[in-house]
Amino acid sequence: MRIAVEGCAHGELDIIYETIQEMEKTNGKKIDLLICCGDFQSIRNLSDLHCMAVPDKYKDMCTFYKYYSGEKIAPVLTIFIGGNHEASNYLQELPYGGWVAPNIYYLGYANVITIGGIRIAGLSGIYKSQHWMQGHHEKPPYNENTIRSVYHIRNLEIFRLKQLTGNIDIFLSHDWPSGITKYGDENILLKGKPFFKNDIENNMLGSPPCMELLEHHYPNYWFSAHLHCKFAALVPEKEGTRITKFLALDKCLPKRKFLQVIIISFKLNPIVRSLSDEIILYIQILFNWSKIFYLYIKMKLIIINIMDKLTIISGTLFLAADVFAIVSLAMPDWIITDVGGDTRLGLMWSCMTLYNRPQVCYSPDLQPEWFMALVCIFVGCILITATIILLASSHWDRNVIPYARWVGFTAMVLFCLAAVIFPMGFHIDEIGGQPYQLPNSHQVGISYILFVLALWITVISELFAGKVCLPHF
């Protein structure tokens, strides 16, 4: 994934998108995502200008209103955090993030999202100690104090972000983490910004909460803006092996270093690259199992006169259960939601479609509950296949039928365990629910329904297999 990182946008979306398109023409490679590190200035109208904390001479409509009204559409998916020069009244309507315009997404006060398997976290605003312990009490119309305190970060946001588990690929903040300059070339920084010297010496440059988050998570990348200069640093983990690559960028002005392109590998399943590949994969699986089903039916017709009818019924039901279970694993439709785009979560892979973007599928990092459910279903499918083979071979040796019964019973137990364990994982970050309780924004998909159907068919099949094993009088 080619990601363009922007420093302070200051409402100049036309210039930023034109720069990206020029880079695409020059390099012949498309930019997949644009990330803005604050001062986005999502000004919709003249009223919004009165909610932005800047001197009057800097109050300008700029170009966001064109994208908000639909006059233009952002040519690349754009994600941004808030800075200290924002239309705060608009962003306050989306405290947990949301679409501010077609193809332009705001992360909210503090949030984390996943795009193409790349996990991006963000913290909006800047740090001021006097408002650190307060809640978000501000509301329009703002006065001289609240028009500034509205964009100051609170301890609640830091607490929420520290609850995140797992690896974070990219972290965004408007403020620099405090003390970050000692991990880069301070001399070059001070040549361009000599007035930073006193703040650096007194450890007053940057945000202490941001450094606290950096040292808590050590994300792969950390991007910032705010100080209107480009600065890079490498922050190694204390007594660890992780390294965070830090980069701050300038504001959008001619001959300024305001844009940087990075390349991060997609976390995709190598089999699934697009929606068309995914459909072909499903069809291929169904086709292969259709051939197996056809051969089984043909065999059944040959031996129907001599093979026990209950054995045939049991074997046929086991085969149907096997097909449904395998198809449920092949499809990423266990849990679905349309919040922030079409998201489908599965056990083997998940797929995401974000506002008119091509669908992206990737292998998920499963939590222990879902991983155990996957193992139970996978082993259960193998055992059901073994049960079908044993039932088919009973035409020649009736002594194998008891083994078929017990192998099928084990498969049934594994499926039941999977059905119990899977809902325990509804607490994962992608869902945000509680064990056995989905949030209202999520619902079970066709894959989960197919698996439950496979479970019930397995139970019925086992009942028939039990009848087969009864002595004949």
Image: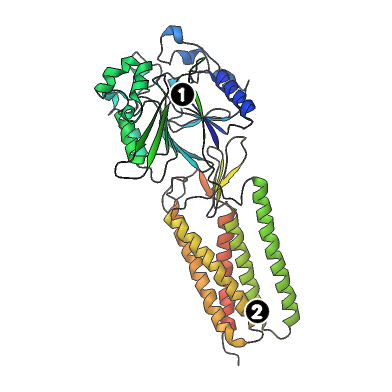
Badge nearest the viewer, 2 or 1: 1
Colouring scheme, one of rainbow, by chain, secondary structure, one colour: rainbow
Residue 281 spot, x, y in % from top left: 66, 54
Farthest residue in the top direction? Answer: 57
Farthest residue in the left direction? Answer: 202
Seen at 62% across and 35% down, the residue is 356
Residue 105 spot, x, y in % from top left: 51, 30
Q: Quadrant of the N terminus?
A: top right
Q: Quadrant of the C terminus?
A: bottom right
Q: Residues within 10 Å of mark 2 (few under 14, many from 20)?
A: many
Q: Nearer the viewer, residue 208 or 260?
A: 260
Residue 197 spot, x, y in % from top left: 29, 18
470 relative to 437, above or below: below
Say whether residue 436 is visible: no
When asked about the image quadrant of residue 234, the answer is top left
- The span from disc 2 to disc 1 (Cα, nearest Å) is 67 Å
Secondary element at image label 2: helix
Q: Amino acid at mark 2?
A: Ala
When asked about the image quadrant of residue 306, the answer is bottom right
Seen at 56% across and 76% down, the residue is 463
Q: Amino acid at mark 1?
A: Gly
Q: For mark 2, what is the residue?
A: 392
429 relative to 413, above or below: above
Q: For mark 1, what is the residue?
A: 7
Q: Residues within 10 Å of mark 1 (few under 14, many from 20)?
A: many
